[in-house]
Amino acid sequence: MTLLQIIQAVVGEVGLTPVTYVIGNTDQAVVQYLALANQVGNQLITEGEWQKSNKTHTFTVQTDSQNGTITSGSAVITGLTDTSSIVADTWQVTGSGIPTDTYVASVDSATQITMNQAATESGTYELTFTQTAYAFPADWNYQINRTHWDRSNQWEMVGPKSAQEWEWMKSGIVATGPRIRYRLLNNKFQIWPIATTASLLAYEYMSTSWIYDTAADSEPSVSLFDADDNTTIFRDRLMIAGIKLRLFEVKGFDATAFQREYSNELDKALAMDQGAPTLTLAPVYTNFLLSAGNVQDGNFPS
């Protein structure tokens, strides 16, 4: 059903004045119906991991190696080939004479940058610059855990790390590991340790979008109704029940029956939105990897 059809169903079921159009209607009652419809949709999008709003984001780690000249006690790197791709605050520097967790503080020219820490050696070395903080997709709502992978190395990324773990990695003796760690910080997806290859990273997330802007759209693209023919990712009866509930609540009427209807519709919608595994109360597991079940205790041949 379209937005207009949903609102018409709502007013028809509760006995209110019929509506011929919604978007652009200045009637205060219709303005309220629209506001409540947007409210219901934006609340529903956080009620579950709706499969139509589940998206995958992939990006390639940006890295660049160049020869640069550093001086002990100075934070300036000179003699670089090209700094056009390097961005301050989100790119790190590694190499001989560069302290751990050193970021680019400013890009001074096409051949010079300034770091946030001073070098500990003098000389010309091959230095690696890597972007470690990446923006979320524009419609990012929240992450789906255990979906973060380094596809180039076929490794699951480790995280999200806590503030304590993050500082331990950056400030402790052991600062590296075989897998990429990640943390959501300052509204960016941040990785550690600095990568030296252009790995392809991926994760799944829930989108803020729940409305199809046009009937031809293959996925939702907006989060507020902007046309009478907009449709949503939610079941029609769920939207109708939600708007009726909110309408009676804001009017101060008894909404007990509408709350029951809405809860039932929400439970059904969540149950039918995705498949579910068949569970057993007596599972039998097979140890197909090395474990205590298939490795002898001792007497290994030399």
Image (cartoon, rainbow, N blue to C red):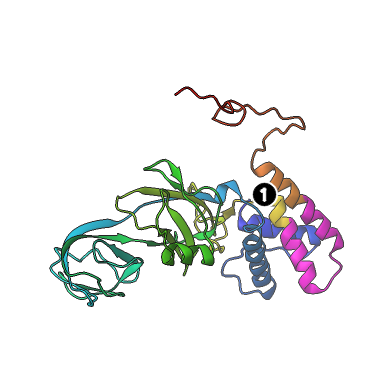
Q: Depth check: give the residue in front, 158 or 278.
A: 158
Verify whether residue 1 appears in magenta. Answer: no
Which residue in the protein does label 1 denote?
Answer: 235
Where residue 2 sits in the image (x, y, percent)?
A: 61, 54
Left or right placement of residue 292 versus residue 80 in this view: right
Q: Is residue 17 above or below residue 298?
A: below
Left or right placement of residue 192 versus residue 245 in this view: left
Q: Residue furthest top?
A: 301
Left or right placement of residue 140 versus residue 107 in this view: right
Where residue 185 sits in the image (x, y, percent)?
A: 48, 67
Q: Quadrant of the C terminus?
A: top left
Residue 271 seen anywhere in this rendered image of the structure: yes
CA neighbours of label 1 inside 10 A, class few (<14), some (14 to 19), many (20+): some
Where residue 60 sits in the image (x, y, percent)?
A: 34, 51
Q: Is residue 257 above or below residue 51?
A: below
- Dot 1 amino acid type: Arg
Q: Quadrant of residue 228?
A: bottom right
Left or right placement of residue 294 versus residue 202 in this view: right
Element under disc 1: loop
Q: Depth check: give the residue in front, 253 or 162.
A: 162
Q: Residue at x 46, y 49 (%)?
A: 157
Verify whether residue 254 appears in magenta. Answer: yes
Most frequent secondary structure within the magenta stretch: helix
Q: Quadrant of residue 128?
A: bottom left
Q: Which residues are magenta?
A: 241-264
Residue 9 seen anywhere in this rendered image of the structure: no
Where residue 264 sits in the image (x, y, percent)?
A: 79, 51
Q: Depth check: give the residue in front, 81 or 95.
A: 95
